Amino acid sequence: MALRHLVIREIKVTLKNPAFIASLILLFVFYAAVGGVTRVGVSQSVEEVRKMAMRIPVVVEESSPLIKALLLNLNASVSNVKLYQSVDEALSENSYVVVFPKGFTEGALAQDMQKVPMLKAVIKLDSLSQVSVQSRVSVVQSVRQVVSRLLPVTLTQLFNITITQKEVALPDQNIATIVYNRVLGLTEVNSILGFSVAAIFVVAFVMGIATSYAATNTAMEKVEKAFEMLLAQPVPRREIVLAKILGSIALALLNAAVVLIAVLVMIYLMASPASSTTGNGVATVIGFDVALLGKNAITYIVLPLTIGLIYSGAIGVVLGSVSPDERTASVLSMPITFLYIGLGIAGMFLSLPINPVTAVIYGVLVAPLPYVFIISELSKNPELLAIGMGTAITLCIMVIAIAIIIFNRDIVILGIRLPRRRKIELE
Amino acid sequence: MSSGVAVEVRNLTKVYGGGVVGVSDLTFAIREGEIYGLIGPNGSGKTTTLRIIATLIKPTSGFAKVFGVDVVKEPLKVRQLVNYLPEEAGAYRDLTGYDFIRFMLSLRFSGRRLEEAVSEAIEIAGLGSTLKRPVRTYSKGMKRLLALSTVLASRPRLLILDEPTTGLDVERSIQVRQIIARYNREYGITVLLSSHNMLEVENLCHRVGILYRGKLVAEGSVEELKVRTGSRNLEEVFMRVRG
Ligand SMILES: Nc1ncnc2c1ncn2[C@@H]1O[C@H](COP(=O)(O)OP(=O)(O)OP(=O)(O)O)[C@@H](O)[C@H]1O
Ligand SMILES: [Mg+2]
């Protein structure tokens, strides 16, 4: 009997906490928004891909009867094949081109089963996003599949022979991309995207920690009843706010460093009995990315991280200062962390081209700034970075100012007053 | 501003969110060197008044000045003249009592003066080796003593104490009252306190203001109030002016 009341109480106290309800609503809105935005991005690229597949642009570097017959079959069975003299010409009209390179025929006819016919492809990208890269790659790969399927049929037609099925290959190394007027291999592009996602995640994660430390510690001080005494001391409120931000940054960095080391230890321990190279593997991957992006790779993370930490610390102080207790503060800061990480990475999966408008959005979120860094460097477009960083710094200063204003007002002592339906009797 | 006035409160009104009236059109003054007691039933506006004078919350209208300095216009300057013991004062759970004393006083003093103030606070607190333990292991009264000791040891020109002896045992209460009286006498510290203990107010305060529903309904020395209302003690005065 008592158990029932106890259980009801447990649930009721949380349900009656307005901050809890607010956080649920926020989470719901957040996931719905991410879903909606992703849907737009995906449908955009699906549309693009559909257009791309209507015509297959081809460049032939080696003229052989086999390739001719293959192209005829391709034209008849799937869609229009259009031949171009050069890759440049093809790309001026299309967003990709499939190349039959020298050695294709030899590969197809060789008795040696290790030798396979290889295709090449060049893809034109207007933005460096996961969705736009993957959708184009899937188009050229589907062309490869069709060619693969048509190969034995064509061989039978031409030579009246039946040979064992050979797959036509189109490995990642054979796919080049043209992005921001430069040529990058697909592996390089994937590595840049991977680096960006990792950098965004790290920045967003550490920002989340800073926010939650700043919020809970600020609210905790109220619960411990030392807050009013502190605020009555002859210290400018601005210093109290800055101290809280700096403290939360230090704690977040400490926390993140421990997490990083722990994860590396975990990877090392998991890998060591089986093979001793995996540990090096991690280092190699990181080293590779750093080498690819140059010495600036560290700047790409450190600068956004610094701004992100100050920004998120200040947001935490604002949340904590209007929360009556640390429970409310943590309930409020949890969805914020989801927002940092989720929205930060969402942009990368959309085909959002980076332009001044999206640079502002990324600046607001701070975490995607490493991505903006890379894009603005690749596209030789420093204004984008300036806009992104400028937005982030401006907002950062604004949030600090808001925190200081709150600390100079009653609300920091009395807490935020949520409207109540109950009428309050006067006199 | 005449030099003899420590606190000047004029037409002070505080309306909280939702229209709750904290204090309404309050006017009174405290002379320098005086111990002034605010009494009144629960919810009559004592804490509201003290918080405004301590610059923690802002009045809706009217003003308050501490040694001629406006609490809204120059709060930082006021905080240099004042120290405040909140109604529910606590300390950081995971710090030791000693660390708390040091931290609070380091916001006001440095060097030799800080060391002196810390020793003074340790003496007032009278908690002995308990000061080396984290505050989360303290009893309610011990926490109150800890907070009180740092506030007193800072020797501000105006001490604002919201129910200073609430939660303390009889002996400790007497001690604290003696310390307040001594600091007032020896260092000329002006004291503004609130209390529900009529005996305490009668023994300690030079003048008393009685608040009722956010308004000052009577003011004067304890003797004056007794004569004016024909009462034998402050408790009776309290009941009579409440009407
Ligand atoms: N944060 C607040 N929000 C709304 N109303 C408040 C708030 N704090 C105090 N009040 C109201 O202001 C009035 C005065 O309260 P105050 O705390 O000043 O009384 P008090 O005299 O100190 O009472 P007590 O003897 O119980 O400490 C009360 O009606 C109270 O409900
Ligand atoms: Mg009170």
Image: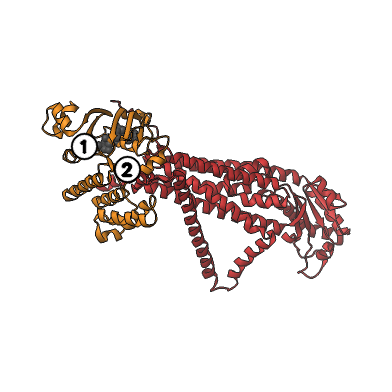
Chain colours: A red, B orange
Mark 1 close to ligand 1, CB under 8 Å: no
Q: Nearer the viewer, residue A234 or A168?
A: A234
Residue position marked by numbered label 2 in the rendering: B157
Q: Position of residue B33 (x, y in %)?
A: 27, 40
The mark nearer the N terminus, 2 or 1, is 2
Q: Residue furthest left?
A: B232
Mark 2 close to ligand 2, CB under 8 Å: no
Q: Amino acid at mark 2?
A: Arg
Q: Position of residue A268 (x, y in %)?
A: 54, 69
Where on the image, by quarter, is ligand 1?
Answer: top left
Q: Nearer the viewer, residue A220 or A346?
A: A220
Drawn side of residue B55 relative to residue A42, left or right: left
Alpha-carbon span between mark 2 and mark 1: 17 Å
For image coordinates 70% across by 59% down, the residue present is A187
The local crowd at label 2, few if under 14, some if 14 to 19, many if 20 or more residues have their Cα within 10 Å, is many
Label placed on residue B206: 1
